[in-house]
Amino acid sequence: MLKNAPKFYEVAKRIVEITNDCIVVAHNAQFDNRILKTEFKRLGFEFKRKTLCTVELAKKLIPDQDSYSLGKLTRALGIPVSDRHRAAGDAQATVTLFKMLLAKDVDKTVIQEYIKLEAKKKTEPRLIDIIETLPSITGVYYIHKADGEIVYIGKSKNIKKRINQHFTGTNSKSKRIQLDVVAVTYEDTGSELVALLKESQEIKRNKPKYNRSQKRSLFTHGLFSFTDEQGYTNLKIAQVNGKEKPITTFANLQSAKSFMLKATEEHNLCQKLNGLHQTQNHCFNHSIKECFGACNEEEEPESYNKRIKKVIANNSFQNDSLVIIDRGRAIDERSAILIENGTYKGFGFFNLNYQINNIDVLQSIITPMEHNRDTQHIIQSYLRRNKRLKVIHLKEQEENK
């Protein structure tokens, strides 16, 4: 969509013209305003506009909603949205929401109260000094108090930028961090996967007081399978309860459903057997020839189950031994994440001139790490998002020899 779109400098003048003497209304206006200010700053222009945030207004005028994200809020209020997550569709939904909020603010006092002209936030000199010492690299960072205690651990693809966000943030956690911080240390990982794994272990080990949300498990839903009376292997999405072992796990129900839809489409699976289409007859995909008829026993269970086994094998490393090769800390280095018989063993780094081809060599460079459900979720989720990662299956390699 953006391939042939104009560059920002080509539309900057028009943005200035159409926003002049206007109040910029947006859902999470602080974010939109920050993006505009950043882009104009690159052009040497100071962009200052009054803003009005429909998130803040909705919280005041329509309290007790389950969520104030644009999608969930518009659904709850019965506002039709077309082209969700596209500029025009989201903007039109925000217009409709804003009109509704205007109508609810009978005296127009709330709207006036929430109009903001962003004041320049000054970062304390001591915080600026800390930021200046940090690199723009991928890794894990540790925020320390004066006595050395770690109060927060995080990971980022750009540590300097992330710490700057902590130090300029206005939410309660950012403000507490700004008061406590005396030093920030970090570890370069090169790989985002290594950073995620190390962050998870370090939070469990140190239990920093501002990492409360990350102390909980990172996943809520899992992919499970069972065989029905006709011999077909069914897939299902369900909450992780600790009793039944999932094939793979997901951070929330939405990502689980998205995975199931994609897997069903890619492997010509049955919507009925995957719980996507509740019906007594054949599923919708069968009517458009994308399901081969498992829903009404037209396709043999053996044929259908082969494709299910492929989905399970692609999304589970249970009893598998493999190495995930990812970025290293330097241009001539790579990281290696070792899974042995389905258990995460740890990670290490190796030079590109060094061949990683057997388990003994790998074990000599690996830093041992703890295997748990969180690390398994992190690895499986990362592999789903990064299909082009190099993965070496050690058992297959041994058999080929």
Image (cartoon, rainbow, N blue to C red):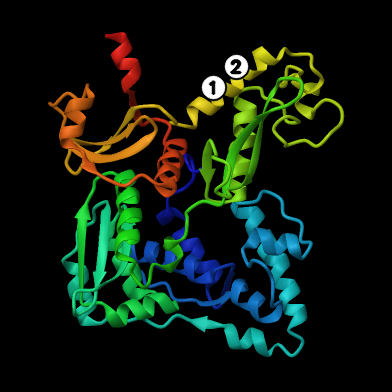
Give the crowd class for mark 2: few <14, some 14-19, many >=20 residues within 10 Å: few
Snapshot quadrant of residue 273 = top right
129 displayed left or right of 197: left
The residue at which mark 2 appears reads as 306
In the picture, the disc for residue 116 is none
Residue 44 appears in the figure: no
Front in this rendered view, residue 124 or 195: 195
Q: Which amino acid does label 1 sit on?
A: Lys
Q: Is residue 308 shown above or below 368?
A: above
Identify which residue is drawn at 57% across, 51% down. Answer: 252
**Extreme residue toward the right, this view:** 280
The residue at which mark 1 appears reads as 310
394 displayed left or right of 304: left
Snapshot quadrant of residue 104 = bottom right
Residue 331 appears in the figure: yes
Q: Can you give x and y, in whole percent of width and height, for residue 151 in the image?
A: 30, 72
Identify which residue is drawn at 60% across, 19% down. Answer: 307
Give the crowd class for mark 1: few <14, some 14-19, many >=20 residues within 10 Å: few
Q: Which amino acid does label 2 sit on?
A: Lys
Q: Are marks 1 and 2 in contact (CB under 8 Å)?
A: yes
Identify which residue is drawn at 60% across, 36% down. Answer: 224
Q: Is residue 94 shown above or below 377?
A: below
